[in-house]
Image (cartoon, helix red, strand yellow):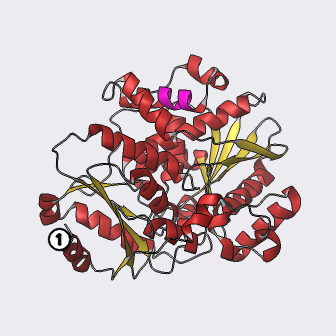
Amino acid sequence: MPQDKGLYMPVGIPRLDDEFLTHLDEYSLPEIAFHVAKNIIGDDIPGDDLKSIIYDAINFLAPVVKLEENVFVLELWHGPSLAFKDFGARFMSRVMSYFLEKGEKQLDVLVATSGDTGGAVALGFLGVPNTRVTILYPKGKVSDIQELQLTTNGQNIRAIEIDGTFDDCQALVKQAFTDAELNEKFRLTSANSINIARLIPQTFYYFNAYAQLLKQGIDKVVFSVPSGNFGNMGAGLLAWKMGLPVEHFIAATNANDTVPEYLKTGIYQPKSSVATLSNAMDVGDPSNWVRIADLFKDDLDVLKNMVTGFRYNDEETLEAIKFINDNYNYVACPHTAIAWQALRDWQQDNYKKDTAGVFLSTAHPCKFPDVFPQSIAGKIDVPEQVKELAKKDKHAVALGKDFEGFKEYLLKNE
């Protein structure tokens, strides 16, 4: 994170060649990922090395599943932590490891999580030499399984339970990056989506989803994106800027509706986050919005033409979960259900026979067992790695949300 407290962006965003884009359906996910990454990264990582990184990191599928005519779900939870964050975390950890040289100062990765980021980062960096990960999560605001994913790793992964919200955790991480003493003592970096290395690999699955639709003869698409810190949406818009022919994006939020309000009123007013059933989206001041504003150069009219915002409360989220189960025999996590509902509401007024609506499914439903009524919970197939988690012991340090306490912890536990 730069000292001016802004965020890094690529100096230029390359447009991919039309030949590649019109023949996307001929490429596998790793092949697409390599082509996209190579265009952004250039020669900073030689081609063969980049290919090795991608084929190691992106070694799972992200299928597009048809639920009904022009309604598809993009399943992004087939990686090891059962969440879409695996794309960013696995790619990032391998890139960081690639650039680390023997004898260099240890890399300290600070990460705030509202649920899924921490688990993905923990597994992505677990055992990576010369790195240490410190995960901050809000006390009582992540699911039991998410907490186990954060706190049971050991080795080079440590967890801090903050008595506050995700926004408080994120503020602590951001402040650490601008603290002179901590930067003198540690080699700090972030694994949150404030780090551009998280967003680049998240573009891969947008291109790959379009490739899967092309195979079905569909070449027009609208994406509905469950949104919290707006990294996922930022990645989609980055893919669009690179030439992916997306017709429209839908920003689907829970009660933390800073962005939908902005799109309606033109006034950007961050607010304190509130806890909801879709906890990974409980963000009142989304960091990545400045990147999206930069992509559109703060032109609200052009932005509104490309992005529509919707917000839903917990009651509406539960209704959506039930509808999806009853009508498609499909179990959606609360974040996924919000994205589906937003797509459905958008299509009511904007339905086009030749345009596919794709909503992003960001996490496996087993991570949120308390959200579902028993009739739906009984249908969830719990993966073996989740059953193994329950046998492990939790290890976390409890801290308040004041920066001095966090700083003292870091200095005392160097």
Q: Decide whether residue 180 is among the magenta residues.
A: no
| Image location (x, y in percent) of residue 376 | 80, 69
Estimate the x, y position of residue 19 in percent, counting from the top left: 58, 16
The amino acid pointed to by label 1 is Leu
Residue at 36% in and 50% down? 195
Asked whether residue 197 is in view, the answer is no
Q: Is residue 99 above or below residue 191?
A: above
Determine the residue positioned at 47% across, 74% down: 393
The residue segment tinted magenta is: 30-35
Which image quadrant is residue 353 in? Answer: top right
Give the x, y percent position of residue 309. 61, 58
> Which residue is rendered at x = 65% and y = 21% of the image?
26
> Which residue is depicted at the point 39% across and 52% down?
125
Q: Main secondary structure of the magenta part?
A: helix
User: Would you name the residue on which mark 1 appears?
Assistant: 411
The answer to whether residue 107 of the structure is visible from this angle is yes
Point out the image quarter for the C terminus: bottom left
Compared with 408, 48 (above or below) is above
Left or right, 304 with respect to 74, comes to: left
